[in-house]
Image (cartoon, helix red, strand yellow):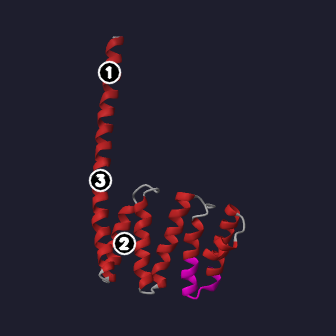
Amino acid sequence: MLRLRSWGICGLLALGMVASSGDDADARRKSKDDGAKWQTLYSAGAQALQNKNFAEASQKLEEAFEIAQNMEATDPRQRRTLDTLVKVYMIQRQWAAAEPWLEKIVVVDEEKLGKDHPDLSFAIARLARNYLMMRKFEQAEANYLRAIAIREKSKGFDEAQVVGL
């Protein structure tokens, strides 16, 4: 009787592992499919940008970002897509259109690097420059001060580093 119970438990465990490995395989397949979809959309968006077809570029890159944001936070495709999308709007001097994407870059970098990482200061300064172009001076100043504070905290005051922001 004990032996049957033991086999029953082992059998249930084995069934669970088979079901789990099936779920893992489905997840890997979906991840691979998403990666391929992202690559297709990103490439189409980058090509459209190169051809100065900005409407198509933004559409494809936004679709690529929808896929990329479901990937792990550390996946570089999120940041790459955002950077290219921001470039589309900045080339056209569409500061307001770039704003939400620049804000997302700050969020992605904060999650990936931490709130006090010196590299985060560059994303914040980029957002501040965009606010400056939109004549949102209070927001620009607040973000520049935050970027400077991060640099000072991590590196100490270095005039060359601050000017680089």
Kind of residue sitting beneath label 1: Gly
Q: Earlier along the polypeptide chain: callout 3 or callout 1?
A: 1
Q: State the image coordinates of residue 112 (x, y, percent, origin top left).
A: 52, 58
Query: Does label 2 or label 1 sit earlier along the sequence?
Result: 1
Q: Quadrant of the C terminus?
A: bottom right
Task: Residue under label 2, please give it.
Answer: 62
What secondary structure is the magenta-colored segment mainly?
helix
User: Mark 1: which secondary structure?
Assistant: helix
Q: Nearer the viewer, residue 35 or 121?
A: 121
> Which amino acid type is shown beneath numbered disc 2?
Glu
Left or right position of 155 against 122: right
Mark 2 burial class by Cα count in 10 Å: few <14, some 14-19, many 20+: some
Numbered range of the magenta stretch: 127-139
Q: Image quadrant for the N terminus? A: top left
Q: Is residue 72 left or right of residue 125?
A: left
Q: Which mark is residue 8?
A: 1
Q: Which residue is mark 3?
A: 32
Q: Amino acid at mark 3?
A: Lys
| Residue at mark 3 to residue at mark 1: CA–CA distance | 36 Å
